[in-house]
Image (cartoon, helix red, strand yellow):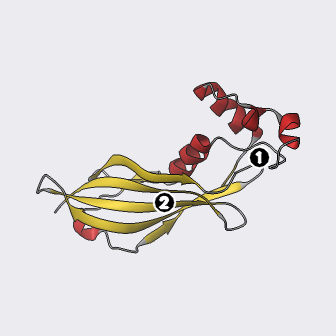
Amino acid sequence: MYFKSTFFEEYQIDDKRVTLGRTITETDFVVHAGHTGDFFPHHMDEEWCKTQPFGQRIAHGTMVFSIGIGLTASEINPEAFSKGYDRMRFVKPVHIGDTIHSEITISEKGDAKRPEMGTVTEHVEIINQKGEVVLVCDHLLLVKRK
């Protein structure tokens, strides 16, 4: 992890970066359930899940989001501030043993209320080892101008 100043003018539409991967473990399921209180059987009860159409435990969507976004945090930009995330969708289930990575594409730029800032939207896709998109969202940034 390192600091790299990137100003609004330096962001280019369609620029893309790809993270390293991370394999999802049973420990991830247990720790996330403990943090959130979400012990629903879809995530925690292997035997019950065998009786359901999906056949195995499904990762918490919020865990996939947290890990996938965490993978993007290899570079700190002190010129940008996160405003949040829009249009998040859980596209496909993630299971124990799946490996995910994130692909981030600059999709929009615009003016901000404050003239010394601009807005940047990063479209985030979290992708499994099969190349399937499992989660999508848009990361909204407020970025300093030069």
Q: Earlier in the sequence, mark 1 or mark 2?
A: 1
Q: Position of residue 91 (x, y in %)?
A: 61, 57
| Residue at 88 percent of width and 41 percent of height | 51
Amino acid type, mark 1: Ile
Q: In the image, 78: left or right of 127?
A: left
What residue did someone put label 1 on? 96
- Vertical placement of 38 versus 128: above or below? above
Q: Position of residue 54 (x, y in %)?
A: 80, 49
> Quarter of the image holding residue 111?
bottom left
- Vertical placement of 56 versus 137: above or below? above
Q: Which residue extends farthest left?
A: 115
Q: Position of residue 142 (x, y in %)?
A: 26, 53
What residue did someone put label 2 on? 124
**In this rendering, does residue 21 appear at all?**
no
| Rendered-image quadrant of the C terminus | bottom left
Look at the numbered disc 2 and give the secondary structure of its residue: strand
| Residue at 66 percent of width and 30 percent of height | 33
Q: Position of residue 44 (x, y in %)?
A: 76, 33
| Residue at 66 percent of width and 65 percent of height | 132
| Residue at 37 percent of width and 46 percent of height | 84
Q: In the image, 29: left or right of 122?
A: right
Amino acid type, mark 2: Val
Look at the numbered disc 1 and give the secondary structure of its residue: loop
Q: In the image, 68: left or right of 4?
A: right
> Quarter of the image holding residue 129?
bottom right
- Mark 1 closeness class: few <14, some 14–19, many ≥20 residues within 10 Å: some
